[in-house]
């Protein structure tokens, strides 16, 4: 995740929050145990979001946390990646117990391994992900490297990788959100790259973004004050759900969800979105990953939060139903 200067200023002003302490762990990097602690929050609606259920995820594994991307590989089956390269797979039972859990890391490119924590993170800073349910392959967009990788179905081998086009996006403002459209095209939104009066840069690929192919179409996204994009997920009607993160004092993190229509995208065009609601304050945290699914004719979104390995933040996994969404332009015609 981008280490925002404004966030640093807030943390310096606030200092450690009451009741929190520096996270000190035995450096266990092998445990496969994950615990899901239910969130006690009444079902309710905020805008077009209706809270369904949620958990705080914890593990004794020191790599566990920092989650920045989320995918659903089946009913209540999750694939989660962190900006430290941690790769988590698990299924939640009906009573919220993780099973078939696995905690590992993404594979490394060929060549000598990086040395030192910072260089290692620069090679593993995953910010967005998508999974093809038919092939089982996974695509990862990495900040810092400014690359997209395609992993094989076993998640142990990098099949292909490709750099984003020039000019290179800043290392802390790179490919923060990625979504695959129904027609096979792929959208990639920067967090804060080359912002100008038109908005932040984004890309539309007609082919595989991890393989050689045509250059992507470049456009601009104007969030209109919603914050910086932290993830994207396709909706059943062809539009795309965008998750925005905005910093403040109370709460520190405000998460705003909005819908963007790919029909508005053209070369150098400015694209805007329609807000549909925000995560209620009691559940507020640093949400960076999103996945959408259909169930019983209804649409749901899962969000995962990045705890930044801070004791006062949480690795939350929450589900909302999307209700009474505004109609698409296609449906209106």
Image: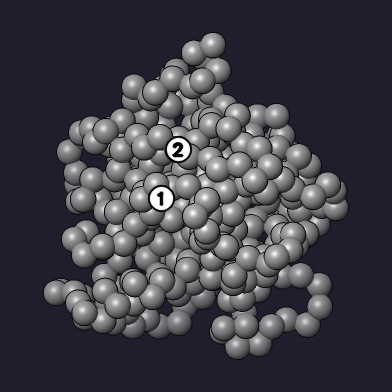
- Describe the element under mark 1 as helix, strand or loop: strand
Q: Position of residue 27 (x, y in %)?
A: 45, 82
Outermost residue to the front: 197
Alpha-carbon neighbours of circle 2 within 10 Å: few (<14), some, or many (≥20)? some
Please give the residue where the numbered disc 1 appears in the rendered image: 244
Of label 2 and label 1, which has the lower sequence position? 1
Q: CA distance from mark 2 to mark 1?
A: 11 Å
Residue plotted at (33% across, 83% down):
24
Q: Disc 2 vs disc 1: Cβ atoms closer than 8 Å?
A: no
Residue plotted at (76% across, 39% down):
206
* Residue 312 position (above or below residue 51): below
**Side of 163 where 27 appears, left or right:** left
Query: Which of the 4 image quadrants contains residue 45?
Result: top left
Residue plotted at (48% across, 66% down):
1
Would you say residue 37 is visible in this rendering?
A: no
Please give the residue where the numbered disc 2 appears in the rendered image: 273
**Side of 129 where 2 appears, left or right:** left
- Describe the element under mark 2 as helix, strand or loop: strand
Residue plotted at (78% across, 42% down):
207
Q: Position of residue 202 (x, y in %)?
A: 60, 50
Q: Position of residue 15 (x, y in %)?
A: 21, 80
**Side of 269 where 206 appears, left or right:** right
Name the mark on residue 82. none
């Amino acid at each position: 995740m981008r280490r925002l200067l404004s966030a640093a200023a807030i943390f310096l002003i606030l200092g450690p929050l009451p009741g929190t302490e520096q996270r000190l762990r035995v450096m266990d990097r092998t445990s496969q145990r994950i615990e899901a602690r239910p969130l006690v929050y009444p079902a309710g609606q905020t805008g077009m979001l209706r809270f369904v259920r949620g958990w705080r995820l914890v593990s004794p594994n020191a790599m566990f946390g920092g989650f920045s991307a989320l995918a659903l590989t089946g009913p209540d089956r999750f694939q989660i990646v962190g900006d430290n390269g941690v790769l988590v797979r698990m299924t939640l039972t009906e009573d919220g117990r993780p099973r078939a859990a696995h905690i590992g890391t993404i594979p490394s490119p060929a060549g000598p391994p990086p040395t030192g924590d910072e260089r290692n993170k620069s090679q593993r800073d995953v910010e967005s992900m998508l999974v093809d349910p038919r092939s089982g392959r996974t695509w990862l967009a990495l900040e810092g490297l400014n690359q997209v990788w395609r992993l094989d179905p076993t998640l142990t081998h990098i099949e292909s990788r490709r750099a984003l086009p020039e000019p290179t996006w800043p290392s802390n403002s790179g490919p923060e959100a990625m979504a695959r459209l129904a027609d096979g095209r792929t959208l990639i939104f920067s967090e804060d790259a080359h912002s100008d009066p038109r908005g932040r840069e984004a890309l539309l690929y007609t082919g595989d973004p991890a393989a050689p192919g045509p250059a992507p179409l470049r456009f601009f996204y104007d969030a209109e004050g919603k914050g910086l994009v932290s993830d994207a997920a396709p909706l059943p009607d062809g539009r795309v759900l965008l998750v925005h993160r905005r910093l403040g004092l109370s709460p520190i993190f405000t998460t705003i969800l909005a819908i963007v229509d790919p029909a508005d995208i053209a070369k150098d065009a400015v694209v805007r979105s329609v807000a549909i609601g925000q995560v209620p304050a009691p559940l507020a945290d640093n949400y960076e990953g999103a996945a959408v699914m259909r169930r019983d004719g209804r649409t749901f979104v899962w969000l995962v939060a990045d705890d930044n390995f801070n004791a006062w933040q949480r690795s939350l996994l929450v589900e909302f139903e999307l209700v009474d969404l505004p109609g698409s332009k296609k449906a209106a015609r």
